Amino acid sequence: MAALLQMAPIAGETFATRARAPWPVLEGGKGEGADPVAAILHGIGSVVKFKRNTAIFNEGDAARHVYKVIGGAIRTCRVLVDGRRQIAGFYLPGDFFGLEWQGEHGFAAEAIDDAVVVSYPRSQLELAAETQPGVQKLLMSLLSQRLSATQNHVVMLGRQTAQERLAWFLLRLVRRTGGNPNLELPMSRLDIADYLGLTIETVSRGISQFKRKNLISVTGAHHVALLDVASLEALASGEREV
Amino acid sequence: MAALLQMAPIAGETFATRARAPWPVLEGGKGEGADPVAAILHGIGSVVKFKRNTAIFNEGDAARHVYKVIGGAIRTCRVLVDGRRQIAGFYLPGDFFGLEWQGEHGFAAEAIDDAVVVSYPRSQLELAAETQPGVQKLLMSLLSQRLSATQNHVVMLGRQTAQERLAWFLLRLVRRTGGNPNLELPMSRLDIADYLGLTIETVSRGISQFKRKNLISVTGAHHVALLDVASLEALASGEREV
DNA sequence: CGCAAGTTTGACGTACATCAAGTAGTGTGG
DNA sequence: CCACACTACTTGATGTACGTCAAACTTGCG
């Protein structure tokens, strides 16, 4: 029934979604035209907006919804008692997050900038999955993709140097945004550091080194262009020295 | 139909499984008696044995099966070009692994010691999931659990010190094996190091320090008893100094 | 324009890695 | 039962990549 949501922590205007949304509310399968799965998702999704740095959900909240980013960017993170923070993932338009399938969210989700999100009630998704194999397949596929990405994250954090991590991050972002080497980074240096398991200073120095080596060019902190993708790729996959 | 498997890389005697297996081929839901899901799994699973240090599957292999450990221990790992290795997970009896839901395995799976495993063809699981919501729920739940564990791994690798990692590892293992603080570690120091993103020397030193502080007692490298769980827990969750 | 937040750069410290000996444990053959 | 060799683990000495502390610079917004 997709009633108005009242889950926003601070933010903004929430509104029902049965009206034809002007943005793509689905996809996820491929790019089909008249997709029954798409229709189902569209039927149960509610659009919600969040202001910069507000929480979509907190660590420990009951996992009652699954989300999809429509606009803006989201981060999921955990903060330790002494303030150390680890970011588990960044989510851009088209990405699903909050896929925990039972119990509580293990990480908080926050809007990096002003963001628009569709929220799908888990209960309805479960129901749909039981009768619609397509929905089920989509959910399995999303969970599986997320697992795979997280496992790659583990390898990076466990065994790569600061430079390798940075190169890996930039390349991953380029691929995620369709291969365009001109990146608009929505997140701060601190976010990047907390994602890569580094400090903000180390991230900054790494970027400066890439600049000096003409691997990238930076115009205004949030805009980076990859100049030498091949060298960055060699770096990212663990071959030493460029 | 569960014919004989011929997937073992080196190892051992493989045999069909339709006969009543002497070990528990299922569980996963809870501990039900006459469980239809259990029956389905039992019907499509094949038992396979693997010798110490042999591969169940390699990185890049097509993900055609999902596995469950019956006896022994399994590790999943990836090796970088220059030999650096990261272990993504350890799997003990009752654990499922190889849950990649499409494409190829991103990590190799190897037997840490002589191990017995049940293998479920993915195609059959998918089929069963479409008609049996219980099977579907089980798969989602397994994937979700694995995702959650991997995300915790990320936090550990990104933001914890060597001592914190070790404490976390030992406690996690104790919980996994039903809370008994007397641990029999099936894996080597090198395995532990590659799981925690450390070197073998750092792991060894950490264990020695825990011994000196009377947090654990070690009798023969593979047998560890946790003496002061509370202090270890404080350490693991990021409170400094014991 | 001017401040505040974000970022970069520099100097220095340290946790962990690396290199290098030892010291158990474990299995084999006499 | 003991010599042996082999592998796994521990311990020590030293190096270094990255963290920490601190100051400058840059950017964007009221």
Image: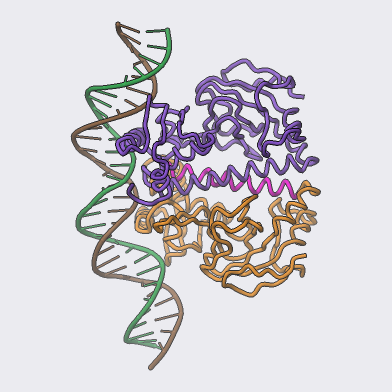
Chain colours: A purple, B orange, C brown, D green
Q: Position of residue B159 (x, y in %)?
A: 42, 41
The residue positioned 32% from the left and 34% from the top of the image is: A208
One can see residue B126 in this view = yes
State left or right for residue B197 relative to residue A138. Answer: left
State left or right for residue C19 relative to residue B74. Answer: left
State left or right for residue A167 relative to residue D16. Answer: right
Pick the residue in front: B231 or A179. Answer: A179
Q: Quadrant where the N terminus of chain B lies?
A: bottom right
Tell me the magenta residue range.
B135-160
Residue B147 among those drawn in magenta: yes
Q: Position of residue B192 (x, y in %)?
A: 45, 57
Pick the residue in front: B225 or A5. Answer: A5
The residue positioned 79% from the left and 49% from the top of the image is: B132
Pick the residue in front: B131 or A163. Answer: A163
The residue positioned 54% from the left and 36% from the top of the image is: A178
Q: Position of residue B78 (x, y in %)?
A: 49, 55
The residue positioned 63% from the left and 31% from the top of the image is: A67
Q: Quadrant of residue B22?
A: bottom right
